[in-house]
Image (cartoon, rainbow, N blue to C red):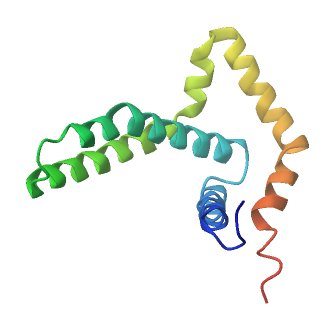
Amino acid sequence: MTRPGGLPDKAHGWFRAWFRKVWDVRGGGLYAVGFAVAFLFFEIREAVIEDIPQLVAMNSVLSSELIGFGIQFIIDSMINFVRALMWPMYVVQLRPPVGLIALIAAFVLFPRYLKAPIERWLFEDADAKP
């Protein structure tokens, strides 16, 4: 059972604030959603496959190891940012003719069926503020 204002509520608010910024910067469409999903996918995969095991495997927590880990984390995040910018390419590469058709269909159908509900969710609290 969660209490109002607890960690799940704050995390939801933090995610929505981050996604709202991505939405505004990336044009507020399917590209923005694809970028956010791809970036989260790459970051989570990187954390599970490399970062967490590397952190656990550290024998001693020397400041130089932590600094190296931090620098590597920042570099990996920048690489994931660039990879997320290219998310349409990954969709097309899934199955070359089918991926391209699915991407075109998504760009045609997204504004019609999904954009309005996403914007309502993103900006529902923005209207309530004075």
User: Left or right of 38: which side holds 109?
Assistant: right
Task: Identify the residue at image location x=16%, y=49%.
Answer: 68
The quadrant the N terminus occupies is bottom right
- Give coordinates of residue 57: x percent, y percent: 21, 37
Tell me: 84 left or right of 92: left
Q: Residue at x 52, y 42 (%)?
A: 39
Give the vertical position of 25 relative to 68 (above or below). Answer: below
Residue 3, x across and y down, in percent? 70, 69
Q: In front here: 43 or 48?
A: 48
In depth, the one of 105 and 14 nearer the eye is 14
- In the rendering, at what x and y percent does residue 113 appear? 90, 42
In the rendered structure, the answer to whether residue 15 lies left or right of residue 70 reads: right
Q: In terms of image quadrants, where is residue 35?
A: top right
Give the residue drawn at x 36%, y 47%: 78
- Residue that appears at 75% across and 18% down: 101
Q: Quadrant of residue 79?
A: top left
Given residues 21 and 89, the one toward you in this image is: 21
**Residue 21 percent coordinates (x, y):** 61, 62
- 35 over 123 or under it: above or below: above
Residue extending farthest to the front is 1
